[in-house]
Amino acid sequence: MNSKLSTFKENLGQLIAAASVSSVNPAHDMSNIGMINLLGDWLDQLGFKTKVESVGIDGKHNLIATIGSGTGGLILSGHSDTVPYDDFQWLSDPLQCTHKENGFYGLGSTDMKGFFAVALEAIQQIELSKLRAPLTLIATADEESTMSGARFLAESGLSQGEAVIIGEPTDLKPIRMHKGISMQAIRVTGRSGHSSNPDLGNSALEAMIEVLSALQEFRSKLQSTYRNDGFTIAVPTMNFGCIHGGDNPNRICGKCELQFDLRPLPGMAIDELRNDITALLEPIADRRGVDIDQEILFGGVEAFEEPEDSDLVKQASMFSGEEAKSVAFATEAPFFKALGKKTIILGPGSIDQAHQANEFLPDNQIEPGTRIYRQFIEHYCL
């Protein structure tokens, strides 16, 4: 017989208490080793072989835990980190699991420590000695900031597992597609001077106007070329998020910076889009006599699609009773697809609860989530 862990609430409470904030701001960022060790100890008790790997960033680790052998099998995967939090906005302690109003409240309860608690419930309902294919649970680092855990996993390789379930909060509805995301900055450097004589300088701001015009035309071209009606917003988007330039009305602007994001559809590669943007900027720099530099602010996540006729999609729809659809947010799914795994996103909780105070996991998704994960394990491992 399998060993048994504590109750669902106790397990979720310990996961929430194991603070694991990841942030690009060093003042908020912290190690995830407490969360990783906690999961690893529990899975050791259940008979898994566990491996903790540094992802090349101090204090950041992935956990890979496997039981069973052979080919094929299932991977249940989630990220171990949470976003930062403002404790003054919470009505309860964000680092404690509080049950009230038909839900479990706490930081990461939905995004996505609740997934691990539900997955552990499902695992404990399986006679693990009878597995005919490997069952693997993965916890990654820094999904909320750099995706360093998933990137490390994709670069290191992963032999086990035919199918991957990523337990991001989807209200237990299967997701087979999402857009990608890339963020970058464009910096124009001209020459400042007294505004009374334009010949004394070279306006970076006026050059940036041309840059913006070229990017708007590029966006229109993308949106007329690419369309996928499986998405609520059926075309790729480009958002000009912020722009800064100059320092005074009576000085010619010497420097100007634009920051924007680009969200491509499946079939559009981020590197190719960046190359296209570079090709747009070079003639503007030559014509205006300015320097134009680019910086990648976020390495990017490719768009993701699992084919509609995939066995995994069919099983997910059968187990959940829901048609597989798309979401606007990005996940770690493309990194598993790059490893050749069939991948789908399906987890308890709502994305509407994520990244905000008083986040909670609804009571009424725990039992169905446990059942769905158990059915996946039975299908792929038994």
Image (cartoon, rainbow, N blue to C red):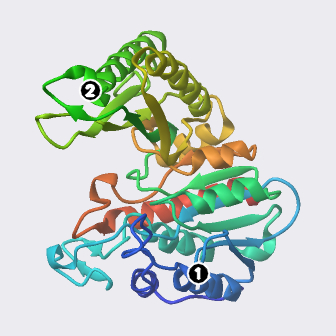
Q: Position of residue 111 (x, y in %)?
A: 40, 63
Residue 104 position (above or below residue 274): below
Which of the pair 355/187 is nearer the observer?
Answer: 187
Quadrant in which residue 251 is drawn: top left
Classify residue 189 as left or right of residue 176. Answer: left
Neighbourhood count class around disc 2 (C-alpha, 10 Å): few under 14, some 14–19, many 20 upward:
few
Classify residue 66 as left or right of residue 58. Answer: right
Q: Amino acid at mark 2?
A: Leu
Quadrant containing the N terminus is: bottom right
Q: Residue at x 31, y 76 (%)?
A: 106
Q: Secondary structure at mark 2?
A: helix
What residue is shown with label 2? 200
Q: Amino acid at mark 1?
A: Leu
Q: Earlier in the sequence, mark 2 or mark 1?
A: 1
Residue 356 position (above or below residue 301): below
Which of the pair 103/187 is nearer the observer?
Answer: 187
Q: Position of residue 206 (x, y in %)?
A: 27, 23
Q: Residue at x 56, y 38 (%)?
A: 302
Neighbourhood count class around disc 1 (C-alpha, 10 Å): few under 14, some 14–19, many 20 upward:
many
The residue lying furthest to the right in this view is 70
Q: Position of residue 20 (x, y in %)?
A: 45, 77
Which of the pair 310/80 is nearer the observer?
Answer: 80
Between circles 2 and 1, the one closer to the viewer is: 2
Quadrant in which residue 213 is drawn: top left
The dot on residue 39 is 1
Classify residue 323 as left or right of residue 68. Answer: left
Q: Position of residue 240 (x, y in %)?
A: 30, 33
Q: CA distance from mark 2 to mark 1?
A: 64 Å
Quadrant containing the C terminus is: bottom right
